[in-house]
Image (cartoon, helix red, strand yellow):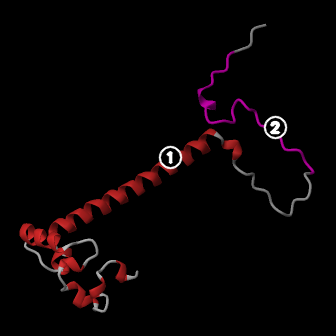
Amino acid sequence: MNINICIDKKYEDKSFKELADSPIDALQGISKTDAEMLKKVFNITTIREFANLKFIKWAMAITTLADEINIEKEKVEEILLDNALEMSFPSSDPISVSSSITRIEVIPDMVDARTDHQNSQSIEITPEKT
């Protein structure tokens, strides 16, 4: 990260330790008036004090956790969607075939479709009327 985009020009030659102990208005976008208001409200004068302000830390923790929860929610939703698709379309799964098979010599037995699906246990077989 180019730190020079975060600080005013007159502080570009400072080390990080010197920057941390610099006035808050050394940060880009914070004016002398803003720095005076921060001193009046929170009794802080340096970038270090600003960074260690408990309200800043609380706000960062809340937003970090909120972002993580959104990411977890998206992961869970994606997994649920994948599972739903797999349950809805079991025939779309690729068939596992050995690469050494060049032809089928014996036709496989046909599976009874009435018993070979996810709801086969719920089907009642009634005798046919003649």
| Residue designated by label 2 | 110
Dot 1: what SS? helix
Q: Which residues are magenta?
A: 105-126
Q: Quadrant of residue 43?
A: bottom left
Residue 45 lies, with reference to residue 69, above or below; the image says below
Q: Where residue 105 sits in the image (x, y, percent)?
A: 93, 51
Between residue 128 and residue 50, name the one nearer to us: 50
Q: Where residue 122 sits in the image (x, y, percent)?
A: 59, 27
Q: Residue at x 56, y 42 (%)?
A: 84
Task: Look at the image and say whether residue 94 sits in the magenta stretch.
Answer: no
Q: Is residue 105 left or right of residue 16?
A: right
Quadrant of the image containing the C terminus: top right
Dot 2: what SS? loop
Task: Look at the image and say whether residue 113 sits in the magenta stretch.
Answer: yes
Q: Is residue 116 left or right of residue 10?
A: right
Q: Which mark is residue 80?
A: 1
- Residue farthest toward the top in the current orientation of the protein: 130
Q: Residue at x 84, y 44 (%)?
A: 108
Q: Alpha-carbon neighbours of circle 2 within 10 Å: few (<14), some, or many (≥20)?
A: few
Q: Residue at x 26, y 64 (%)?
A: 61
Q: How far apart are labels 2 and 1 at the CA level? A: 32 Å
> Disc 2 or 1, which lies upstream in sequence?
1
